[in-house]
């Protein structure tokens, strides 16, 4: 009865026209990566000595030269993307990574003789994650409870966490170890040094797991939708009954957790951590997230974008080696690449809009 | 004087204007009508230099004029009252009003006194008195609209575009605006007036043009135009205003019981009941405190005190989540700030308030979400390129429909609708009225806040009138006349007439 009368009054023509925009946000990045890959492998083929493999396109370079070093950045870029989508920022991730790696190292050294290998492996995974999560929660609490700007809060905590990383080893380990470098017993080796075909695969696999989990969270889960909503319009989200404060707190906790994962991978891979672990990583992480399509004004960004953004930066960094460029130019080249990548994203959006406009003009 | 010559304008896949030619004579007030998304605002914005057309020209005084920026437009003497209000929220009213042409001292320094005096003078033209030193953020939507009008008129433009200037104004404020428009007309200012409110278009405009789906349909002089003819041009069929059939106000049990609700500086000691199946209309002037009561009931006002009972059980103040889980819904007044996430798709906005119902174990049910969104968009005649298009690109009326669909989709026992049809075209308005009435018939209690008096009078089973934060009267439907309600709103004693 009710629907009937409404159908009566609404017009016969359906006013919701149904066609979907064929725009995938990450498409531009994929193109950049393919082009970059083509250039590097062409040079790598040309550069290789006769009988030797392509200097770029070979298993060792792709895993050890790109996937493994980028894994820390990519893992943290996924966490950072969550924060950036809510229009926030977390510049303390590098320091959290250091604190979680060093803190766990300090603890592992003290307990390792008393436990079985499997217990130690579990601890070596759980401890950095727990430390990262705690640091992230602290960030979130300060931001939400005191209503402070995330840049300032994480600027402060960055300094605090980095300071903690400097302090921890000193008082627990001075007598046994060189204060600058901690050598762990082979506690973490069995897991993190696991090899397939002669290369370390765990960092890369951890990275992919993080990206997939992050992607599921953001795309498929209610909680992810809410993250986008509060980044797009916080007031409207409150008017829709979203728990804005909880969501924000959780987002910073997740970013901290991702830094903890990065700390775990780093600790496992090197079997050691130093006070300079993760130093200035936050800048690359933020750049990677933004290159991957996250908008600093909030509401936009994806986990896959974070991975691809990091990959672009990692390929360029790797390319500097394989192209035999001078290391002195590294920072300049990477800086330029970031600026170009971000503007390319803008340009591709513009071109896409033009194309759609032309299509629309023709359709009518 | 102004001639639009075959103007075409497209946005990402949407043709907003298709070969529109239209001429406007010097000194006339030209009405522009059409459904939501017909292209009215786009045409106005092209004249005001905010958009440039893909093809076609704008001629002013017979000369082809290239207006490619708002600055050009200002220089050519064109001003616009925008439908979507845009201000710097942290600057004062005076600073916002004088933006662009700040009074200076010694050519270099800001002359604060002159600025304040000028702002007050601009507002006085439309009988508004406001503290011009307060921040823009503190104003209500309607007050912003008044400031917007004052700002545009204050540029001394010779061509003025009013894009739905009265959409959140109540009767007396609109009257003040009409007075101003008459004075401007006497001064020879040429005006384009966009509105969905028929009576005011008929009252003000010398000629009325109609757009439909981005195409020009025709122009009529006021003498030859009838409401029905215009509506036919707009949507191709006639629409009659929807009048609800059930007028029984003592039907159900009390659903909402509000006692001594007070929020300092907003409203004072307000008590009322709403029964199941009732539509209680709230009338009042701009700033009377109606929207503030709505947000307090919905748990968004932490400083509110008093008692609220829903279905006989007390409701904790200050908790949106409890209000929602007990079955209260609120369609807020300001769709841009409170109602919608502009960067999100129509589908995402639709489901934002009902995510808990559209999910299983934290995972979204996309198919169901899409199905419901499409269903409601169809019923409300939302014009959008797709469910996935960001709502930022939709016309004002279509955004409003989505803000409403969001809460209709969730469903409620008590639905508070604050300006539900602000900026919505005639056809969709009738559909919305019918939906609201149907909900009431099914036993939903409705609190209707609207600045459009005919809407309140037609739809409500009972009308409560507010003035300066207090409930000052109750008018049963049978005795509700426009005159009587306006008197109560404005505190004019009946004896004086
Ligand atoms: N910035 C934009 N980006 C994308 N599409 C737009 C943009 N502005 C307008 N449109 C589209 O152009 C069409 C006309 O919009 P316009 O705002 O002119 O309608 P209108 O007649 O003013 O409607 P309303 O009565 O709802 O205000 C709409 O379909 C709208 O979706
Ligand atoms: Mg409009």
Image (cartoon, coloured by chain):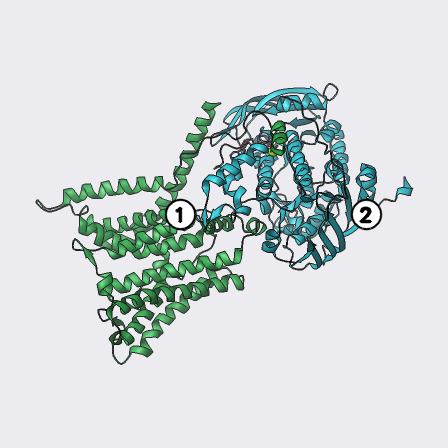
Chain colours: A green, B cyan
Given residues A95 and B4, the one toward you in this image is: A95
Q: Is mark 1 within 8 Å of ligand 1?
A: no
Q: Residue at x 62, y 27 (%)?
A: A8
* In the depicted structure, whether residue B200 falls above or below residue A54: above
Which quadrant of the structure image shows residue B320?
A: bottom right
Q: Position of residue A81 (x, y in %)?
A: 41, 52
Q: Quadrant of ligand 1?
A: top right
Taking the spot 62% from the left edge, 37% from the top edge, the residue there is B83
- Mark 2 is surrounded, within 10 Å at the Cα level, by few (under 14), some (14 to 19) or many (20 or more) other residues, namely some
Name the quadrant of the N terminus of chain B.
Answer: top right
Q: Position of residue A200 (x, y in %)?
A: 21, 57
Taking the spot 32% from the left edge, 53% from the top edge, the residue there is: A209
On the rendered structure, is B287 left or right of B110? right
**CA–CA distance between discs 1 and 2?**
54 Å
Q: Which mark is residue B172?
A: none
Q: Residue furthest right?
A: B495
Q: In terms of depth relative to the viewer, which is nearer, A329 or B267?
A: B267
Locate residue A247, reporting x and y percent: 49, 56
Residue B319 picture quarter: bottom right
Q: Looking at the figure, which quarter contains the C terminus of chain B?
A: top right
Question: On the image, numbered disc 1 is attached to which residue?
Answer: A302
Camera-near label (1 vs 2) is: 2
Task: Using residue B176 as the reference point, say whether residue A72 is left or right of it.
Answer: left
Reading the image, the residue beneath label 2 is: B473
Which chain does the numbered disc 1 sit on?
A
Which residue appears at 50% of the width and 62% of the height?
A143
Where does the image place residue A51, in percent across and percent down from the top left?
A: 8, 45
């Amino acid at each position: 009865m009710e629907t009937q009368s409404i159908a009566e009054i609404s017009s016969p023509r359906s006013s919701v026209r149904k066609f979907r925009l064929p725009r995938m946000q990450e498409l531009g990045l994929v193109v950049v990566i393919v082009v970059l890959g083509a250039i590097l492998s062409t040079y790598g083929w040309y550069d290789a000595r006769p009988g030797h493999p392509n200097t770029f396109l070979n298993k060792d370079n792709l895993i050890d030269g790109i996937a493994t070093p980028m894994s820390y950045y990519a893992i943290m870029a996924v966490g950072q993307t969550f924060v950036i989508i809510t229009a926030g920022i977390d510049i303390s991730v590098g320091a959290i990574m250091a604190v979680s790696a060093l803190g766990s190292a300090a603890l592992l050294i003290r307990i390792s003789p008393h436990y079985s290998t499997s217990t130690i492996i579990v601890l070596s995974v759980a401890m950095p994650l727990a430390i990262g999560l705690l640091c992230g929660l602290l960030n979130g609490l300060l931001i939400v409870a005191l209503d402070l700007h995330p840049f300032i809060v994480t600027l402060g905590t960055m300094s605090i966490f980095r300071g903690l990383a400097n302090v921890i080893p000193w008082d627990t380990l001075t007598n046994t170890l060189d204060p600058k470098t901690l050598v762990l017993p082979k506690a973490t080796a069995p897991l993190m040094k696991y090899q397939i075909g002669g290369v370390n695969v765990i960092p890369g696999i951890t990275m992919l797991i993080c990206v997939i989990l992050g992607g599921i969270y953001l795309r498929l889960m209610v909680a992810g939708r809410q993250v986008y909503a509060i980044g797009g319009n916080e007031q409207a989200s409150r008017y829709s009954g979203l728990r804005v404060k909880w969501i924000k707190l959780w987002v910073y906790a997740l970013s901290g957790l991702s830094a903890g994962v990065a700390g775990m991978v780093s600790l496992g891979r090197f079997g050691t951590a130093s006070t300079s672990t993760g130093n200035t990583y936050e800048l690359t992480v933020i750049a990677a997230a933004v290159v991957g399509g996250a908008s600093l004004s909030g509401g936009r960004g994806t986990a896959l974008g974070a991975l691809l953004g990091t990959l672009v930066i990692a390929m360029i960094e790797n390319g500097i080696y394989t192209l035999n460029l001078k290391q002195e130019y590294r920072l300049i080249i990477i800086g330029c690449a970031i600026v170009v990548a971000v503007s390319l994203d803008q340009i591709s959006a513009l071109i896409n809009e033009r194309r759609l406009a032309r299509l629309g003009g023709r359709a009518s | 004087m102004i001639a639009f010559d075959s103007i075409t304008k497209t946005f990402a896949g949407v043709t907003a204007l298709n070969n529109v030619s239209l001429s406007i004579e010097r000194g006339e007030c030209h009405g522009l009508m059409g459904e939501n998304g017909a292209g009215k605002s786009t045409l106005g914005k092209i004249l005001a230099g905010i958009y440039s057309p893909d093809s076609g020209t704008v001629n002013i005084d017979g000369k082809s004029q290239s207006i490619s920026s708002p600055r050009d437009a200002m220089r050519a003497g064109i001003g616009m009252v925008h439908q979507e209000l845009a201000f710097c929220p942290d600057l004062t009213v005076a600073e916002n009003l004088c933006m662009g042409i700040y009074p200076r001292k010694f050519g270099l320094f800001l002359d604060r006194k002159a600025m304040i005096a000028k702002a007050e003078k601009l507002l006085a033209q439309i009988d508004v008195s406001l503290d011009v030193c307060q921040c823009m953020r503190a104003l209500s939507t309607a007050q912003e609209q008044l400031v917007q009008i004052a700002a545009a008129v204050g540029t001394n433009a010779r061509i003025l575009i009013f894009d739905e200037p009265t959409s959140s104004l109540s009767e007396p404020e609109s009257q003040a605006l009409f007075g101003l428009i008459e004075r401007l007309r006497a001064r020879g200012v040429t005006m384009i007036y966009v509105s969905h409110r028929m009576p005011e278009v008929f009252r003000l405009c010398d000629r009325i043009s109609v757009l439909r789906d981005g195409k020009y349909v025709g122009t009529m002089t006021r003498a030859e135009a009838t409401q029905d003819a215009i509506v036919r041009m707009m949507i191709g069929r006639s629409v009659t205003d929807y009048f609800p059939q059930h007028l029984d106000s003592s039907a159900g049990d009390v659903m909402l019981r509000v006692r001594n609700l007070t929020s300092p500086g907003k409203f004072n000691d307000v008590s009322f009941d709403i029964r199941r199946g009732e539509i209680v209309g709230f009338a009042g002037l701009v700033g009377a405190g109606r929207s503030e009561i709505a947000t307090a009931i919905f748990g968004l006002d932490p400083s509110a005190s008093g008692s609220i009972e829903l279905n006989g059980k007390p409701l904790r103040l200050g908790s949106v989540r409890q209000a929602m889980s007990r079955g209260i819904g609120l369609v807020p007044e300001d769709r841009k700030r409170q109602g919608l996430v502009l960067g999100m798709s129509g589908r995402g906005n639709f489901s934002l308030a009902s995510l808990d119902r559209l999910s299983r174990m934290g995972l979204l049910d996309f198919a169901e979400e899409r199905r419901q969104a499409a269903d409601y968009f169809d019923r409300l005649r939302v014009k959008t390129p797709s469910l996935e298009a960001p709502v930022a690109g939709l016309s004002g009326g279509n955004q409003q429909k989505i803000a409403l669909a969001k809460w209709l989709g969730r469903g409620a026992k008590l639905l508070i609708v604050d300006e539900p049809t602000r900026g919505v075209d005639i056809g969709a308005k009738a559909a919305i009225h019918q939906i609201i009435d149907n909900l009431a018939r099914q036993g939903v209690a409705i609190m209707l806040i609207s600045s459009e008096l005919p809407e309140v009078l037609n739809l409500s089973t009972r009308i409560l009138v507010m003035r300066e934060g207090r409930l000052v009267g109750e008018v049963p439907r049978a005795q509700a006349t426009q005159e009587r309600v306006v008197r109560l709103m404005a505190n004019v004693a009946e004896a004086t007439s």
